[in-house]
Image (cartoon, grey):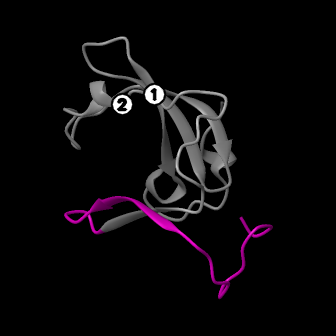
Amino acid sequence: VADELEVGQEVQVRVVSVDVDAGKLGLSMKEEWSGGDREPADLSPFEGVEPDQWLSGKVARIASFGAFVTVTAPDSDAEADGLVHITQIRDGYVENVADELEV
């Protein structure tokens, strides 16, 4: 991220999600989905999953800001990748995601 942005830099973003209850605002600097080389994942099988329900997953890839985990929807074969942000990996400070998880 530091290679692309710096503190104080002005950028153009768009709102992609708003979660008033959690106090979270999702932003993107990318253009709206343009087709690209793959279709967006169908996340509808995950719509009924409650926040207190735990799912098993497999780490697909690690990034400096977190890990992408592949999960299967309950009572379904539907799979999707989701981001576990570095601040959500464990309680306390995580300096390096690779020290906590492996692919």
Position of residue 87 relative to residue 32, above or below, is below
Q: Residue at x 62, y 77 (%)?
A: 11
Q: Which residues are magenta?
A: 1-23
Q: Marks 2 and 1: in contact by CB < 8 Å?
A: yes
The number of discs equals 2
Position of residue 96 relative to residue 99, above or below, is below
Where is residue 96 shown, x and y percent of the image? 67, 55
98 with respect to 26 (left or right): right
Q: Residue 43: give its label.
A: 2
Is 40 covered by the magenta stretch? no
Q: Secondary structure at mark 1?
A: strand
Position of residue 89 relative to residue 49, above or below, is below
Q: Secondary structure at mark 2?
A: loop
Q: Residue at x 80, y 67 (%)?
A: 3
Looking at this view, is 98 or 6 the one in front? 6
Q: Which residue is mark 1?
A: 80
Q: Residue at x 63, y 50 (%)?
A: 97
Image quadrant holding the N terminus, namely bottom right
Q: Residue at x 54, y 65 (%)?
A: 93
Is 21 covered by the magenta stretch? yes
Where is residue 69 shown, x and y percent of the image? 51, 34
As measured in the structure, the alpha-carbon distance from the residue carrying label 1 to the one carrying label 2 is 7 Å
Where is residue 65 shown, x and y percent of the image? 61, 56
Where is residue 94 shown, x and y percent of the image? 58, 59
Image quadrant holding the C terminus, namely top right
